[in-house]
Amino acid sequence: MSQEHIVSYTADEIREKLARGESQTDWARVDALTDEEIEAAMRDDPDWQDLIDIDWSKARWVTAHKKKAISIRLDDDIVDFFQATGKGYQTRINAVLRHFVSEQKHKKG
């Protein structure tokens, strides 16, 4: 990429541009993309490498619920597994428990 095409903006400048309705995104081009073109672009993007073939058909929108602080004892290997997945591991533990509760409710209903 040529240096002559590189520009930089401060966060405030970007906010001002957005407030004026200015955008450098070619939305007409984006809207014209077919699903096949989008999928091909995703397959070429290394950031999507581990996510492209995930079956999202059963995904659900999850809203935040009020949290209750408790003390809980879990097996070491369970805690180690979730901590190894990085920041937000407690949220992931909560999501696994929520899924279990949901499945149990469906079995009873």
Image (tube, rainbow, N blue to C red):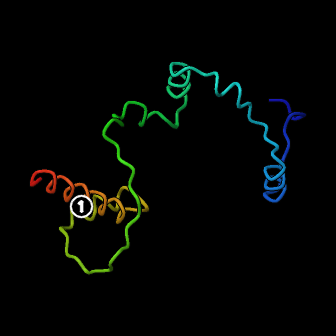
The kind of secondary structure element at disc 1 is helix
The residue lying at 24 percent from left, 54 percent from top is 99
Q: Position of residue 57 (x, y in %)?
A: 33, 35
Q: Amino acid at mark 1?
A: Leu
Image point (46%, 33%), residue name: 49
Determine whether 81 is above or below 40 in the image: below
Q: Residue, x 34% and y 62% (percent of image)? A: 83
Image-based side of 29 in relation to 48, left or right: right
Q: Is residue 38 above or below residue 62?
A: above
Query: In the rendered view, does 35 fall on the left or right side of 12?
Result: left
Using residue 82 as the reference point, say whether residue 63 is left or right of it.
right
Q: Is residue 87 above or below residue 21?
A: below
Tell me where residue 18 appears, x and y as whole percent. Answer: 78, 50
Taking the view exactly as shown, the residue that stands out farthest to the left is 108
Using a 10 Å C-alpha cutoff, classify the residue at mark 1 as few (fewer than 14 neighbours), some (14 to 19) or many (20 or more): few
For the N terminus, give its image quadrant.
top right
The one nearer the camera, 8 or 96, is: 96
Residue 13, x across and y down, in percent:
84, 55
How many marks do you count on the picture?
1
- Residue 40 pos. (x, y %): 52, 21
> Quarter of the image holding residue 44?
top right
When the figure is inspected, residue 6 is found, relative to residue 100, above or below; the finding is above
In this view, the residue farthest toward the front is 109
Q: Quadrant of residue 78?
A: bottom left
**Rendered image quadrant of residue 68:** bottom left
Taking depth in this image into account, of 101 and 53 the one nearest to the observer is: 101
Q: Which residue is mark 1?
A: 97
Lateral position of residue 72 relative to residue 65, left or right: left
